Image (cartoon, helix red, strand yellow):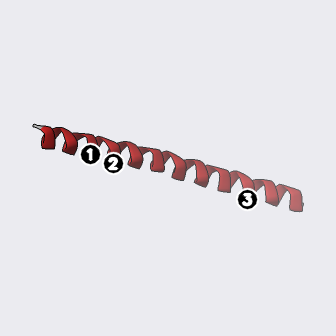
Amino acid sequence: MHTETKAMICTAAVLIAMGIFKELAAVCLITAVIYEEGVKKFDR
């Protein structure tokens, strides 16, 4: 039972980490796109 609990906690931690990284990746992409748009506007 203890090993199962450990495995469940590890799986949950990995899923949470993946979710966080997914959010971070999305934020980074959005920021990069906005930054590029801003640079284009300033270049005009």
Is label 2 in contact with label 1 (beta carbons under 8 Å)?
yes
Q: Position of residue 27 (x, y in %)?
A: 58, 47
Alpha carbon of mark 3 to alpha carbon of mark 2: how far? Answer: 32 Å
Is label 3 in contact with label 2 (beta carbons under 8 Å)?
no
Q: Residue at x 34, y 43 (%)?
A: 13
Q: Residue at x 27, y 46 (%)?
A: 10
Residue type at mark 1 is: Thr
Q: Give the number of the mark in front: 3 or 2.
A: 2
Residue at image mark 3: 36
Q: Earlier in the sequence, mark 3 or mark 2?
A: 2
Q: Residue at x 88, y 62 (%)?
A: 43
Circle 3 packing at 10 Å, graded few (<14), some (14-19), many (20+), is: few
Residue at image mark 2: 14
Q: Position of residue 39 (x, y in %)?
A: 81, 59
Task: Give the residue furthest to the bottom.
Answer: 43
The answer to which image quadrant residue 5 occupies is top left
Q: Position of residue 28 (x, y in %)?
A: 60, 53
Residue type at mark 2 is: Val
Residue type at mark 3 is: Glu
